[in-house]
Amino acid sequence: FPIHSADFVISSPRADKCPEPDMPEFAFIGRSNVGKSSLINMLVNRKDLAKTSGRPGKTQLINHFLVNEQWYLVDLPGYGYAKVSKEDRKKFMGMINHYVKERPNLINLFVLIDSRHTPQKNDLEFMAMLGREGIPFSIVFTKIDKLSSNQVRKNIAAYGKEMLKQWEELPPQFKTSASSKIGRMEIMAYIDNLVDA
Ligand code: GDP
């Protein structure tokens, strides 16, 4: 999956400030430090297209990139900072809820989860909201190079088990390692298929 171009378009404070929804859009979200910037850079073969999310309290923006002049890659702000106030968290979730619900060209939201973690309440709640709202999403388990394949399987199964308490089927799942470029082909093929659909 060759990347001919990957260009920053705009950072938007709110969903209604985003670019015209004139191209298919694929967004990435996850807790801070989950490996989102690394994954995005790995997918588009760039060293620093997406910047590391940095510190809590920093302005949280929706970042649009245009890939191959064909689709938008959207880097959403990280959630789950421990130090953020309840009020800021509410504001942030409002912004994200608005984005995922109101963006007509959003084809798929990739929810990133650190494969080392046991199921986390805020990830499960976030995905439950996506399911209720009928927003197409898939799960990306990141940093799998940090674990044995057996442990990766175990941790992913634990998420599946939690999710199946609420839903009849699981969303598509990907396993990735930005440092070893694992999972790039699978995700790019998935996007490619949906861009052409
Ligand atoms: P973000 O805050 O979600 O954008 O996370 P970053 O991409 O900045 O990654 C957070 C930290 O995890 C950095 O120190 C990365 O080098 C590291 N990291 C990210 N992805 C991987 C991975 O696939 N494997 C390993 N071993 N480390 C990773």
Image (cartoon, helix red, strand yellow):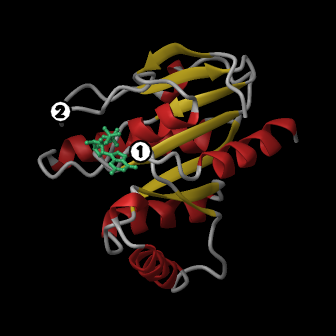
Q: Position of residue 66 (x, y in %)?
A: 63, 20
Q: On the image, which quarter does residue 44 sit in?
A: top right
Lower position in the chain sequence, tag 1 or tag 2: 2
Q: Is the residue marked by circle 2 packed among few (<14), some (14-19), or many (20+) residues within 10 Å? A: few
Quarter of the figure with the N terminus: top right
Q: Residue at x 49, y 63 (%)?
A: 127
Q: Which residue is mark 2?
A: 57
* Figure quadrant, ligand 1: top left
Q: Position of residue 116 (x, y in %)?
A: 32, 67
Name the secondary structure under disc 1: loop
Work out whether 68 lies above or below 189. Answer: above
Q: Is the residue marked by circle 1 packed among few (<14), some (14-19), or many (20+) residues within 10 Å? A: few
Q: Is mark 2 within 8 Å of ligand 1?
A: no
Name the secondary structure under disc 2: loop
Q: Which amino acid is tagged 1?
A: Ser
Q: Position of residue 35 (x, y in %)?
A: 37, 45
Q: Residue at x 52, y 15 (%)?
A: 8
Q: Which amino acid is tagged 2?
A: Gly
Q: Which residue is mark 1?
A: 179
Q: Is mark 1 within 8 Å of ligand 1?
A: yes
Q: Residue at x 65, y 82 (%)?
A: 168
Q: Position of residue 17 (x, y in %)?
A: 51, 19
> In this image, 8 relative to 69: left or right?
left
- The one of 42 and 157 positioned closer to us in this rendering: 42
> In this image, 27 relative to 39: left or right?
right
Residue depth check, mark 1 versus mark 2: number of the one nearer the observer: 1
- The one of 153 and 75 positioned closer to us in this rendering: 153
